[in-house]
Image (spheres, rainbow, N blue to C red):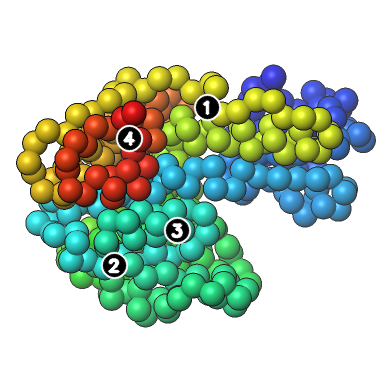
């Protein structure tokens, strides 16, 4: 095992398999001394750090852990919606959510919203063109939604670029009664344009987990955001372990050996393992309580604002992010609560 800070071409000269996370840039320079690499994989959903064209030219198989953090990001977005819904005095059940990007994360979020009965629309032109049979809408339709949440890759060119998808014109078209959440790639929103609008007096409800030019982000934008975090939306212990498990299974398959380990064998018991629901509050009050007991985005927001002073702090916050669990780590006893099924269907476990 090597640190991403010290790994180099000489270190990898004799490697047969290379497994990385997002901090290691895998390219021709890193692999210059290697003539025998058989398999490369990243335990992350994102692949910006991998030169896939180079690997393909060298006939080196590559896989990513696409979808490993989808549940975590969907739960992050739900926490943000509940917090912002309370601040804006919204009834979330009456709102419409526009999901831009219907891949792993967008689909996971759509499933949660369906369970909760929250109307939502999907926008994903590449998937629509590829024959995905789900109903898709245009960005014009998305711009009319109460909540707009972004889950696309960073694409600089081609028929469907996502860089500056929310440029100054599109940002300026948002009202102060809409909510924009970015938990995909920072470059999808033009951060400088957002800052200029804020400085001109425009009111935007902006939740940013990702930023342009990470880790050297525009610090002046932070005070204007409604909620701000350090690219941690997908950082649950389950998401990280799931990514590792996906690589393990893929490598076993590649090597032709039997996989005999499973994720659940290695996850620690959740600190907040069992919650009893006894009160007679309505569904949305209980949901708010449950979700924020497991993950309250405001805690991360407050820590970020208090400690974010430059690139090194951004890296530090990400690297030392505390253990965060997914709903599936929490066992509930809902008793005779009428909406128990919805609570369990978004991921919480039922007590046996």
Q: Earlier in the sequence, mark 1 or mark 4?
A: 1
In the rendering, at what x and y percent does residue 117 appear?
27, 61
Q: Residue at x 38, y 30 (%)?
A: 329
Q: Earlier in the sequence, mark 3 or mark 4?
A: 3
The residue that label 2 is drawn on is 119
Q: Earlier in the sequence, mark 2 or mark 3?
A: 3
The residue that label 3 is drawn on is 106
Camera-side mark, 3 or 4: 4
The local crowd at label 2, few if under 14, some if 14 to 19, many if 20 or more residues have their Cα within 10 Å, is some
State how far apart marks 2 and 1 are (Cα).
33 Å
Q: Earlier in the sequence, mark 2 or mark 4?
A: 2
State how far apart marks 3 and 4 are (Cα).
26 Å
Camera-side mark, 2 or 3: 2
The residue that label 4 is drawn on is 350
The local crowd at label 4, few if under 14, some if 14 to 19, many if 20 or more residues have their Cα within 10 Å, is some
Dot 3: element? helix
Q: Earlier in the sequence, mark 2 or mark 1?
A: 2
């Amino acid at each position: 095992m090597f640190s991403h800070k010290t790994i180099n071409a000489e270190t990898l000269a004799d490697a047969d398999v290379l497994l990385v996370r997002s901090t290691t840039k895998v390219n021709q320079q890193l692999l210059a001394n290697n003539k025998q690499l058989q398999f490369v994989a990243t335990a992350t959903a994102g692949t910006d750090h991998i030169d896939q064209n180079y690997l393909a030219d060298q006939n080196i198989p590559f896989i990513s852990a696409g979808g490993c953090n989808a549940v975590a990001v969907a739960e992050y977005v739900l926490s943000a919606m509940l917090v912002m819904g309370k601040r804006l005095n919204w009834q979330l059940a009456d709102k419409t959510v526009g999901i831009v990007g219907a891949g792993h994360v967008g689909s996971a979020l759509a499933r949660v919203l369906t369970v909760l009965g929250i109307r939502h629309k999907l926008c994903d032109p590449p998937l629509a063109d590829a024959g995905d049979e789900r109903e898709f809408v245009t960005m014009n339709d998305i711009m009319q939604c109460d909540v707009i949440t972004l889950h696309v890759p960073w694409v600089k060119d081609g028929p469907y670029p996502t860089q500056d998808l929310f440029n100054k014109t599109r940002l300026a078209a948002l009202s102060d009664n809409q909510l924009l959440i970015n938990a995909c790639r920072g470059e999808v929103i033009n951060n400088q344009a957002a800052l200029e609008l804020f400085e001109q007096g425009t009111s935007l409800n902006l939740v940013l987990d990702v930023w342009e030019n990470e880790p050297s982000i525009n610090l002046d934008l932070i005070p204007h955001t409604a909620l701000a975090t350090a690219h941690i939306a997908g950082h649950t212990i389950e998401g990280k372990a799931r990514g590792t498990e996906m690589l393990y299974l893929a490598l076993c398959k590649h090597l032709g050996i039997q996989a005999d380990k499973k994720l659940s064998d290695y996850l620690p018991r959740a600190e907040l393992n069992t919650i009893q629901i006894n009160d007679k509050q309505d569904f949305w009050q209980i949901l708010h309580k449950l979700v924020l007991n497991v993950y309250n985005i405001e805690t991360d927001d407050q820590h970020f604002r208090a400690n974010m002073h430059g690139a090194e702090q951004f890296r530090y916050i990400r690297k030392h992010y505390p253990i965060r669990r997914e709903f599936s780590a929490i066992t509930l006893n809902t008793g005779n609560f009428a909406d128990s099924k919805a609570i369990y269907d978004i991921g919480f476990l039922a007590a046996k």
